[in-house]
Image: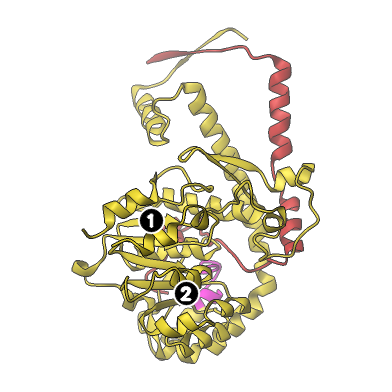
């Protein structure tokens, strides 16, 4: 099966501005850490993760 | 670059792309919109993992408190019920449950009053922080017999949620579900008001090693009673998400309705409230219009209700997790978001006005 992308040209300046806004709005690890530390909320929440047993992330019948 | 880029794919691959576009809810949108959607999703996934990792790094600071809480609770855990004992016979399982958080939409849309005046006949699952308001609104176990409250936070301040005359009045008809690492005074207060105590483990380190706290505490619980241990629940970091899991994992309800689960703030909420995560956290000197203020507290659109909300970093963390787990829930689970706003939307989440939900799931 063959297809094609029809590329619409976007003003380069506009495109560049959008990217910079996105990157600027990305919350970084250090900013998040700083907020959590100053908020005094440290340690009161956690998400349980397991790379080897993803199903268990939804809960376990018997622990 | 040429205006047209040719590419070849197999029919099988194209079928998968079509299915994925349909599944993402963008079947009637342009290809450009869909590509942007999946590319943005990839980006937020990375950020999500980053936030989780950071938050989880803090748990070591609280680890000793959690062990202490568990040690003090253990003799009572041996005597009390398991959350598994709440599982009903199949014929008695309600067709739906309402999970009640304490988000600003509750007051904005008078959801508690609407529920109180309804003939809803499913289960009521309160997050602990809203229990007193729920009872004050007339949503009591006398009227709604399948009545539950959930506590997972291992901190002392939760005690105030159980220290009230209305808890004393209705406690004996309230099923309480508590994490084994709940602050002991919290459980003591609930017990004094005759709340029926049921225990479960909150999962956080089970697969780290055989010596993980989840495994060791599990073995200790089995040593005297609870031969099959206790259920282990994913909390998603907060009681609202834990209550959603309880609704289908433990109570086996097929339709789980969310109200007050905003995981975000309203535009007209005071900045002091937002910046302190509802006064739960210490207020920080962050200006709303500053660069860092806009980063930490983005304003986002909920396309399901066409409403905006303001996220704080903790809500970003909670919201990411809940949306992911809903998207991964089994086919038989139908999650209905009747919060009518907030940040919970996406795959497997059915938006609905709360009046419509009550009409559909109330007895005539």
Quadrant in the rendering for residue B285: bottom right
Quadrant in the rendering for residue B299: top right
Relative to B13, say whether B166 is above or below: below
Query: Which one is nearer the viewer's eye here, B224 or A34?
Result: A34
The yellow-tinted chain is B
The red-tinted chain is A
Relative to B50, say whether B229 is above or below: below
Residue at 70% in and 48% down: B296
Magenta span: chief secondary structure = loop
Relative to B9, say whether B135 is above or below: below
**Which residue carries the number 2 mark?**
B201
Query: Which one is nearer the viewer's eye here, B51 or B275?
Result: B275
Please provide percent x and percent y for residue B228: 35, 80
Please provide percent x and percent y for residue B70: 55, 83
Query: Which one is nearer the viewer's eye here, B223 or B285?
Result: B285
**Which residue carries the number 1 mark?**
B257
Residue at 78% in and 41% down: B291
Which span is picked out in magenta? B203-215
**Sequence order check: which comes first, mark 1 or mark 2?**
2
Within the magenta stretch, is there residue B333? no
């Amino acid at each position: 099966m063959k297809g094609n992308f029809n590329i619409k040209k976007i003003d380069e300046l506009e495109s560049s501005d959008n990217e910079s806004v996105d990157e600027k709005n990305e919350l970084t690890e250090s900013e998040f850490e700083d907020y959590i530390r100053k908020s005094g909320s440290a340690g009161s929440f956690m998400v349980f993760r397991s790379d080897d047993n993803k199903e268990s992330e939804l809960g376990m019948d018997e622990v | 670059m040429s205006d047209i880029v040719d590419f070849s794919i197999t029919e099988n691959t194209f079928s998968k792309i079509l299915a994925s576009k349909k599944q993402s809810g963008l079947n009637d949108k342009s290809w450009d919109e869909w590509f942007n959607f999946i590319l943005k999703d990839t980006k937020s996934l990375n950020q999500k993992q980053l936030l989780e990792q950071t938050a989880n790094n803090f748990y070591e600071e609280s680890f000793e408190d959690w062990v202490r809480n568990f040690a003090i609770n253990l003799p009572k855990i041996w005597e009390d019920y398991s959350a598994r004992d709440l599982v009903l016979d199949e014929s008695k399982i309600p067709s739906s449950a309402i999970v009640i958080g304490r988000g600003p939409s509750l007051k904005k849309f008078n959801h508690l009053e609407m529920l109180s005046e309804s003939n809803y006949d499913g289960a009521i699952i309160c997050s602990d922080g809203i229990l007193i308001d729920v009872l004050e609104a007339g949503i009591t176990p006398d009227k709604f017999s399948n009545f539950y409250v959930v506590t997972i936070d291992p901190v002392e301040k939760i005690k105030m949620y159980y220290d009230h005359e209305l808890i004393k009045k209705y406690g004996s008809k309230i099923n309480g579900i508590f994490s084994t690492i709940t602050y002991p005074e919290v459980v003591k207060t609930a017990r004094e008001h005759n709340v029926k105590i049921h225990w479960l483990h909150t999962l956080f380190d089970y697969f780290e090693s055989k010596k993980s706290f989840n495994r060791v505490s599990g073995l200790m619980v089995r040593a005297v009673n609870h031969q099959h241990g206790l259920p282990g629940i994913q909390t998603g970091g907060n009681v609202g998400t834990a209550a959603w899991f309880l609704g289908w994992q433990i109570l086996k309800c097929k339709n789980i309705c969310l109200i007050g689960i905003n995981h975000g703030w309203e535009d007209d909420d005071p900045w002091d409230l937002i910046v302190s995560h509802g006064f739960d956290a210490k207020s920080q000197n962050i200006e709303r219009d500053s660069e860092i203020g806009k980063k930490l507290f983005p304003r986002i659109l909920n396309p399901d209700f066409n409403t905006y909300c303001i996220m704080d970093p903790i809500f970003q963390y909670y919201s990411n997790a809940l949306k992911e787990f809903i998207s991964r829930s089994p086919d038989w689970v139908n999650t209905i978001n009747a919060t009518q706003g907030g940040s919970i939307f996406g795959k497997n989440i059915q938006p609905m006005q709360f009046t419509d939900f009550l009409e559909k799931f109330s007895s005539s």
